[in-house]
Image (cartoon, rainbow, N blue to C red):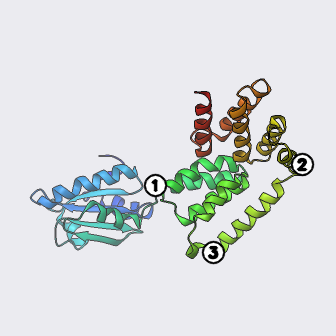
C-alpha cells in the first residue's frame, strides 16, 4: 500500500474514512474475493489514484471481512464505490462502471491536473514577474483545452509581458458568448499597451524604413527597439528580414540579436520555436 491507497479495517476506519476526508476526498471501494466486477473495477481505481498521487485517498474495504463497516455505510451490492468528503458520503455508484464514468465523477471533487500550473503562474504575476508566468500558464491553457478562465489569465500575462500579437491572437479566439467584462478589460489593456509601445524613436525609425525599405541598418535599429519594448515578434521578424538579404550583416549583429531574443523567451516558448526554425532554414 501507499499513502494514497490503503486497506481499511476497524483499527483505521475512523481515521482514514472520516478524519482524512476533512483533508482530502476519500474514495471507498467495497469489494469481495468472489465478486468478478470488483476485480475489473479495482485496477481502474488504483490506476487513477496513482495518477493523482495523493490528491485523494483510495480506501479499499473487503466487505466480507469488514461487514460492520459495510453495514454502517449502507452497502447492499458489490462493488460499491463511495466518495466521502467532510466526513459524509457525497457521491458514489454500485456495479461496474467505465473508466470515463469514474473520472467524470471524481473530477467534481478533485483538483484539476493543471491547477498547480495556474497557481505557479498567478504567484509569478503577483510578484510582477509576468515573463516567468508565461510558461506554466501556457501549459495549463493547453492541458485544460483552452479553458476560458485560464485564457483570460494567460492573455493578461502576455499583455503585461508586451507579447501583444500573441495576446491579440488569444483574445480573437474567445467565443462571442464568453466576451464578458474581463474580456473587454483585457482588450482595452491590449490597445493601451500597443499605443504606449510606439515611442517617438520607434515611429521615426518606422518612417525611415518606409522611405527606404532596403536600409538594413535602420531595419536593425528598429528591430532592437522593438525587442527593448517587448515586441518580440516584430523585432525578430526584422532580424530575419535582414538575414534573408545579408547573413552577416553588422559583422553578425543581426544573427546575434536574433539568437539572444530567442534565448530570452525561454526554452519551449512557441514564439522562440517558430524563430528558431526560421533561423535554421536561413542557415541551412
**Mark 2 or mark 3, which is nearer to you?**
2
Name the residue: 40% across, 49% down: 53
Q: CA distance from mark 2 to mark 3?
A: 37 Å
- Of tags 2 and 1, the one toward the viewer is 2
Query: Residue 5 at what x, y percent from top left?
Result: 31, 51
Task: Please indicate whether residue 182 sits to the left or right of residue 64 in the image.
Answer: right
Mark number, residue 204: 2
Residue at image position (19%, 68%) is: 95
Residue 113 tag number: 1
- Quadrant containing the C terminus in the rendered view: top right
Q: Eyeballing the image, is 182 above or below 235? A: below
Report the disc number at residue 180: 3
The mark found on residue 160 in the picture is: none
At 76% from the left and 28% from the top, the residue drawn is 249
x then y, percent, for residue 56? 39, 57
Q: Is residue 134 left or right of residue 146?
A: right
Q: Position of residue 200 (x, y in %)?
A: 90, 51
Q: Of marks 2 and 3, which one's residue comes earlier in the chain?
A: 3
- Residue situated furthest left in the rendering: 34
Amino acid at each position: 500500500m501507499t499513502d494514497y491507497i490503503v486497506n481499511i479495517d476497524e483499527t483505521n476506519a475512523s481515521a482514514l474514512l472520516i478524519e482524512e476526508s476533512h483533508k482530502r476526498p476519500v474514495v471507498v471501494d467495497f469489494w469481495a474475493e468472489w465478486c468478478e466486477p470488483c476485480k475489473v473495477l479495482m485496477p481502474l481505481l488504483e490506476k487513477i489514484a496513482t495518477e493523482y498521487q495523493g490528491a485523494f485517498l483510495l480506501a479499499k474495504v473487503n466487505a466480507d471481512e469488514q461487514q460492520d463497516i459495510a453495514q454502517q455505510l449502507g452497502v447492499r451490492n458489490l462493488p460499491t464505490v463511495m466518495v466521502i468528503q467532510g466526513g459524509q458520503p457525497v457521491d458514489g455508484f454500485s456495479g461496474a462502471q467505465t473508466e470515463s464514468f469514474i473520472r467524470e465523477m471524481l473530477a467534481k471533487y478533485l483538483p484539476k491536473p493543471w491547477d498547480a500550473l495556474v497557481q505557479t503562474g498567478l504567484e509569478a504575476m503577483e510578484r510582477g514577474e509576468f515573463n516567468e508566468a508565461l510558461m506554466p500558464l501556457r501549459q495549463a491553457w493547453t492541458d485544460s483545452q483552452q479553458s476560458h478562465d485560464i485564457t483570460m489569465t494567460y492573455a493578461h500575462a502576455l499583455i503585461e509581458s508586451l507579447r501583444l500579437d500573441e495576446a491579440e491572437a488569444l483574445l480573437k479566439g474567445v467565443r462571442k458568448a464568453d466576451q464578458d467584462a474581463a474580456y473587454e478589460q483585457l482588450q482595452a489593456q491590449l490597445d493601451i499597451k500597443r499605443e504606449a509601445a510606439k515611442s517617438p524613436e520607434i515611429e521615426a525609425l518606422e518612417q525611415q524604413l518606409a522611405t527606404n525599405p532596403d536600409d538594413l541598418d535602420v531595419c536593425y535599429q528598429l528591430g532592437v527597439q522593438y525587442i527593448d519594448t517587448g515586441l518580440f515578434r516584430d523585432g525578430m521578424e526584422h532580424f530575419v528580414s535582414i538575414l534573408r538579404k545579408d547573413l552577416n550583416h553588422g559583422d553578425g549583429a543581426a544573427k546575434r540579436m536574433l539568437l539572444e531574443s530567442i534565448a530570452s523567451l525561454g526554452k519551449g516558448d512557441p514564439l522562440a520555436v517558430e524563430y528558431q526554425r526560421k533561423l535554421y532554414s536561413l542557415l541551412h
